[in-house]
Amino acid sequence: MQEIETARLYLRQFTLDDLDELYRIYSDPEIMKYLRGVRSREATEIAIHTMLKNWEQNNFGMWALVHKIDRKMIGRCGLAFLDKTPEVELGYVLNKVYWNQGLVTEASFVSLNYGFDILHLDRIVAIARPENIASQRVMQKVGMKYEKNAFYYETDVLYYSISRETDQSKVFL
Ligand SMILES: CC(C)(COP(=O)(O)OP(=O)(O)OC[C@H]1O[C@@H](n2cnc3c(N)ncnc32)[C@H](O)[C@@H]1OP(=O)(O)O)[C@@H](O)C(=O)NCCC(=O)NCCS
């Protein structure tokens, strides 16, 4: 997987050296509120191995987001299979110190562009809990449209999607 550069970020493969920083994120209840709760250090390490395995198996997965200025690993963004389906979803988590600066929107455009141009997907979806306004704003800003209420990962969610025809990600890269 090649490293990708945006205006403010490097997107690269995770390594086990990211464990401390990723655990800082995954153990923070405020950040993990709308995900499935905080994770232990052991679970975070397993998550890194799973992300690496997914890239190997599928040629897509989560990128580690590295802030260009301070060179810190600040979160993850990328593509994954949506809960027990063949659909591909956009997903993201960011260290709260960096919220609301447009950084995940920047990384999400890369993810959509990769999905449509490299993987030749026809469609990419995203889900969020109804209360997770920040996540839905990211979906809207990258051009995804609300499609339906749904139930995934054992919880009620709003389901957004974007198709190759309406994708605008290239314009922003
Ligand atoms: C969701 C998340 C990744 C967004 O990352 P980010 O880099 O802060 O996103 P952006 O800055 O690109 O966009 C966030 C948008 O939400 C808006 N926003 C944030 N909190 C909000 C709130 N409570 N009410 C209304 N708008 C809100 C911001 O103003 C911004 O919109 P704008 O650009 O129109 O002003 C980040 O909030 C996060 O890590 N949350 C915890 C993990 C999570 O929920 N992941 C998604 C699971 S579905």
Image (cartoon, rainbow, N blue to C red):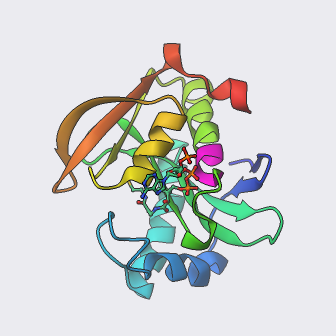
In this view of the protein, which residue sits in the foreground, 17 or 141? 141
- Tell me which corner region of the image, top left, top right, bottom left or bottom right, holds residue 86: top left
> In percent of the image, x 49 and y 69: which residue is there?
49
- Tell me which corner region of the image, top left, top right, bottom left or bottom right, holds residue 123: top left
Magenta stretch: residue 9 in it?
no
Residue 60 position in % (x across, y down): 53, 44
> In percent of the image, x 29 and y 55: which residue is there?
131
Q: Which residues are the magenta region?
A: 103-107
Residue 105 position in % (x across, y down): 59, 45
Q: Is residue 55 above or below residue 148?
A: below
> In percent of the image, x 40 and y 44: which residue is there?
136
Q: Main secondary structure of the magenta part?
A: helix
Q: Is residue 69 visible?
A: yes
Relative placement, left or right, of 157 versus 164 is left
Q: In this view, does 18 lie above or below 166?
A: below
Residue 43 position in % (x across, y down): 39, 79
